[in-house]
Amino acid sequence: MLARRFTIVCLLLTLFSMFFASLVAQAGRTERGWQNARTTCLFSQDINCGRRR
């Protein structure tokens, strides 16, 4: 009985921690979209267009 409750608590804690980690990772990312693209990249077929080094 105690092991079952411990298992359920651990699974819930794992789900919460994975959700929280995804929120933190999403908040740390910069938004990359068409707003930040260069005008030349819109018409270029180059695979490296828009990459910053």
Image (cartoon, rainbow, N blue to C red):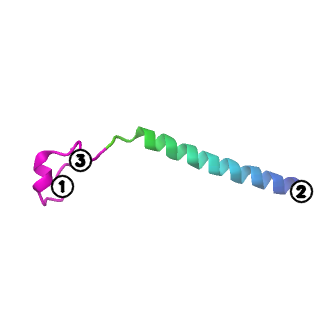
Q: In which quarter of the image is the C terminus?
A: top left
Q: In which quarter of the image is the N terminus?
A: bottom right
Q: Which amino acid does label 2 sit on?
A: Met
Going by the image, does 3 lie left or right of 11?
right
Mark 2 surroundings: few (<14), some (14-19) or many (≥20) residues within 10 A: few
Q: Nearer the viewer, residue 53 or 45?
A: 45
What SS does tag 3 mark?
A: loop
Going by the image, does 45 lie left or right of 17?
left
Tell me which numbered mark, 2 or 1, is placed earlier along the sequence.
Answer: 2
User: To which residue does mark 3 refer?
Assistant: 34
The residue drawn where x is 44% and y is 44% is 26
Q: What stretch is highlighted in magenta?
A: 32-53
Kindly report the distance in space between the C-alpha atoms of the residues bearing marks 1 and 3.
15 Å
User: To which residue does mark 2 refer?
Assistant: 1
Tell me which numbered mark, 3 or 2, is placed earlier along the sequence.
Answer: 2
Kindly report the distance in space between the C-alpha atoms of the residues bearing marks 3 and 2.
55 Å
Q: What residue type is labelled 1?
A: Asn
Q: Which amino acid does label 3 sit on?
A: Trp
The residue drawn where x is 23% and y is 42% is 36
User: To which residue does mark 1 refer?
Assistant: 48
The residue drawn where x is 21% and y is 48% is 51
What SS does tag 1 mark?
A: loop
Contact between labelled residues 3 and 1, with CB atoms less than 8 Å apart: no
Image coords of residue 10 (percent x, y): 72, 51
Going by the image, does 13 lie left or right of 30?
right
Image coords of residue 34 (percent x, y): 23, 47
